[in-house]
Amino acid sequence: MTTLIQTAPRPDGFPRAVSLLLNIGHGIDHMFLLIFATAVATIAVEFGYSNWADLMPYSVGAFALFGLGSLPAGRLGDLWGRRIMMIIFFVGIGAAALLTSLTQNAWQLAAGLSLIGAFAAIYHPVGIPMLVQNVSNPGAVIGVNGLAGNLGIAVAALVTGFLVKWIGWRAAFAVPGLLAIVCGIVFAIVCPHETEAPGKRKGKAKVVLSPAMLARAFAVMTAAAVTGSLLFNFTTNGNSQLLSERFLGVVEDPAVLGAMLAVIYTIASLAQVIVGRMIDRMSIKSLQWWISVVQIPLIIVAAHTHDWWLFASLLVVMIFIFGSIPFTDAMIVRYVDDRLRSRVAGMRLTVSFGISSVAVWLLGPMVKGMGFTTLLWVMAGIAAIKAAIVLLLPEEPAVVETAPA
């Protein structure tokens, strides 16, 4: 059984300054996790490694804790309050980045990156539910938030490339770390105190499913998120080295390559705004299925292209990979009431990010042993599996009624 809950208009979200900082937080979250992937070749040389692929597995702790830490972070967000958790996020991830900039060997670096991952785990189960509480158009809000997150990926590629070239890889961690701490201080000043923790509130989901259908939706949502996160981790952690390999003899300046990757990520990020608005008006199941299916041939084309043809094909691939990101958060908003959203998001993220962190560990060895062409074919297979999984989502009304903005 699937029914719609009619809701009265409510105040639309937080003050603009708070919403802006929550969106900046998403950019910081993704940026910090990908600084290493952009600077890995330079760090490998300093630490005495002949190949960047040999150093890449040392970052797996960051992505493992990014997933595993989501469950306790979500629970604390619902029980303690989301404001205090976001302050901890900003200050903690900034301090962790500063510590990482001081590391002297691979194992110290691994510890620093893992600490970044632990604080990064706070954002998704806490920041996104905080941003969408009481808004009338959650799909559009999630789309803009996704744009902010992926602009963080673009900034990681662009800023890291230039900081590595001009100052050194340590500055690529230290400078953003200081800015994150400043954001945390400003957030503490401008964000209103919560009258009660989300877990103590009362409410209902926008779409009410029977217990059996809700369990099915959660299982399919998590499985789809796992495959989507695998594609996301393989691409965002490997694209920098993919461009370096396939533009050899054409473009070799790391700052220029970083700028090219930033252009790809910036344009691709706009897809989330479009998809977010479509989610408010269309069936999540059919929209997500088509976006998953289209990824398959696009990834295969990218597997066999070089230099500027690769640039064009990779741009289109990232448009659809980024475009599929808002679905899981939109489903949580649609199926789960606000007092439980952080915990449900935390459970989903723990499973999906925890499993998909293996992509970061496998990336270096797979590329070293088989090459990027085989890796991209593997990714096309993962996209096909995701499309099949999405077909198992329960049916729902095509349009969910929302309060006017």
Image (spheres, rainbow, N blue to C red):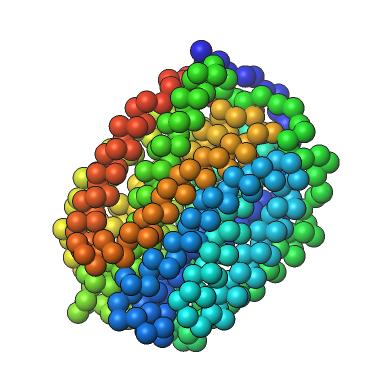
Question: As rendered, which of 268 and 288 lies closer to the eye?
Answer: 288
Q: Is residue 195 above or below residue 177?
A: above
Q: Is residue 57 left or right of residue 91?
A: left
Q: Quadrant of residue 387?
A: top left
Q: Quadrant of residue 325?
A: top left
Residue depicted at 30% across the width and 52% down the height: 316
Question: As rendered, which of 189 and 312 lies closer to the eye?
Answer: 189
Residue depicted at 48% across the width and 61% down the height: 61
In the image, residue 110 lies at what x, y percent? 49, 70
In the image, residue 308 lies at what x, y percent? 22, 66
Residue 386 appears in the picture as rendered: yes
Residue depicted at 45% across the width and 70% down the height: 36
Q: Is residue 25 left or right of residue 391?
A: right
Residue 148 appears in the picture as rendered: no
Among all residues in the image, which is located at the extreme left?
304
Q: How many marks?
A: 0
Quadrant holding the C terminus: top right
Residue depicted at 62% across the width and 52% down the height: 122
In the image, residue 279 lies at what x, y percent? 47, 34
Among all residues in the image, which is located at the extreme top?
1
In the image, residue 338 lies at what x, y percent? 67, 33
